[in-house]
Amino acid sequence: MHAWRSWWLRFSEFESLQMRKFVGETAKTLIANNTIASVVKLNPHHRPSSPNYCSNRSHLPPSLYSPISSYSIMASTPPVTVESLNPKVLKCEYAVRGEIVSVAEKLQEDLQANPGSHPFEEILYCNIGNPQHLGQKPITFFREVGMLQLHCDEKLLFPLMCVMLCQVLALCDHPALLDKRETMGLFSVDSIKRASLILDQIPGRATGAYSHSQGIKGLRDTIAAGIEARDGFPADPNDLFLTDGASPGVHMMMQLLIRSENDGILCPIPQYPLYSASIALHGGTLVRYYLDEATGWGLEISELKKQLDAAKQKGITVRALVAINPGNPTGQVLAEDNQRQIVDFCKKEGLVLLADEVYQENIYAPDKKFHSFKKICRSMGYGDKDIPLVSFQSVSKGYHGECGKRGGYMEVTGFSPEVRQQFYKVASVNLCSNISGQILASLVMSPPKVGDESYDGYMGERDGILKSLARRAKTLEDAFNSLEGVSCNRAEGAMYLFPNIRLPNKAIKAAEGAKKAADAYYAIRLLNATGVVVVPGSGFGQVPGSWHFRCTILPQEDKIPAIVSKLTDFHKKFMDEFRD
């Protein structure tokens, strides 16, 4: 036993000596190779190993004397860094929810934690088309007053803009309500009838189940009928892909069309940054065509041709043209003749026409009218197979403003069955859009009709919202045009104004010193002084050397005077501070 212990002690001493020598040798190698200089900092009492060490490690397993990588010594580099992310993600930008909004959210937190900590009492979000966030009430046919108490004053039943639960959706999600006698007193007859019809169209009457990847067939039938009623031309439900708002449809089309950076998409400038972001994410090239601010943001065919030819000279294959009508952020409504020119241009050049028509209900100018590009194509004699057209619609905009419900669709015409199969394959990867959004899209495209119990109330709400938006747009337009160095085209439609700001050179220099675009510098100063949130025009694109910002017309009408006052006071002080 004593002999065994003596042998074990000698062996342990030998192994300990070998290990110390091995560690010293490894450290010298790492330092000499500069693979991880921080190793020597791990132990402040570390001393250089003796040069007289044994190099014979043949008795040790290879795992003990193989070179040690830097991450096996210490995890000095995270597995994911900004530099190691997909460069396409780093390239894309979305100004609508960019730096300005992040600062606004921080200011809002400060106000909640420390009231009176800033020279304003609230943040006024004029940056994004999010109507209900800014106080717009839902349409009663889509939503119903929730849980009214029986003793509620009868007069309170008629102000339809209250806290509401989704009427038809509630009945669809809880079919048992349809069989209760009390339901007749809480919901309108036509909403009960519509809910029953929708439930019959849903397989298994299950709103919590997956649907067909293009959307529930019965709901697509309803939407197709609404499109046909709008345009006066047939619509095929099989051409419809119901989506979670319009954005997924845009992403799907970019994914399908863009093969490499040598593929380009013609987009208006200014443009809604969804398009530039999606093009960047899918590795394509944004081909800009500039709208003419001097003519009310007109779209000139000569400009399209100029930019198309320039792209071709750079080796870019332009696949599609984006037309936003009514315009975002510019608010113009395309004339019918102009639309015909655009269709002819796409036909001649072999381009897919991507028609963003999500603001089709938001028309304020009495001399303007919305015409869908599909209607224009059919009226020109182009049939289903003659020109590739994708039209986008959403429940987020219009007079309904149901942004959070995430409903919408794209109508796809002019593509071969083989290409359509690829569309369906991509859609099926995402299984389906949400069922509540699908239902709401069908309601938006088929609202109450003359003779329905809900019709008068529905029309009163609809017209009330649109007339109020028109008044707000005019008030803000006049206010902007009264400011020094500011000019603003009228908002013919959509939800925004896009005023041009001629900033003093001193302000531009100050922005350069702050490493910001001049309009971004203006917007951040505006926010910090007033709490009003706008989006710099540089986030939408603009003619180089010009500066703008986008302001929504969505704050409730009683808040518009305060916004005008804040903007006016700030702008005067800003111009005085930087006057050349």
Image: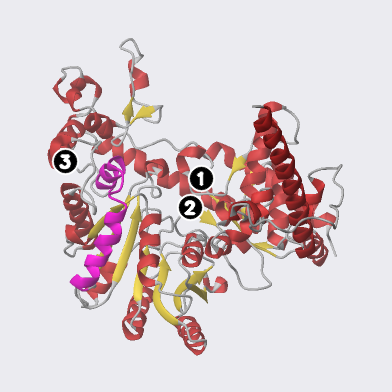
Taking the magenta stretch, the answer to whether it contains residue 9 is: no
Residue 554 numbered mark, or none: 1
The answer to whether residue 181 is above or below residue 12 is above
Mark positioned earlier in the residue sequence (1 or 2): 2
The image shows residue 65 at horizontal and vertical percentages of 65, 55
Q: Is residue 359 visible?
A: no
The single residue placed furthest to the bottom in the displayed view is 313
Q: Residues within 10 Å of mark 2 (few under 14, many from 20)?
A: many
Q: Which residues are magenta?
A: 416-444
Do the numbered discs 1 and 3 sit on residues whose CB atoms are within 8 Å?
Answer: no
Q: Is residue 295 above or below residue 316?
A: above
Three-letter residue code for mark 3: Ile
**Magenta stretch: includes residue 441:** yes
Q: Is residue 48 left or right of residue 392?
A: right
| Label pair 1/2, CB-CB below 8 angstroms | yes
Is disc 1 placed on a helix, strand or loop? loop
**Which of 546/264 is in front?**
264
Report the residue marked by disc 3: 202
Q: Nearer the viewer, residue 455 or 555?
A: 555
Q: Which mark is residue 495?
A: 2
Give the colour scheme shown: secondary structure
Q: Earlier in the sequence, mark 1 or mark 3?
A: 3
Give the residue type that dot 2 points to: Met
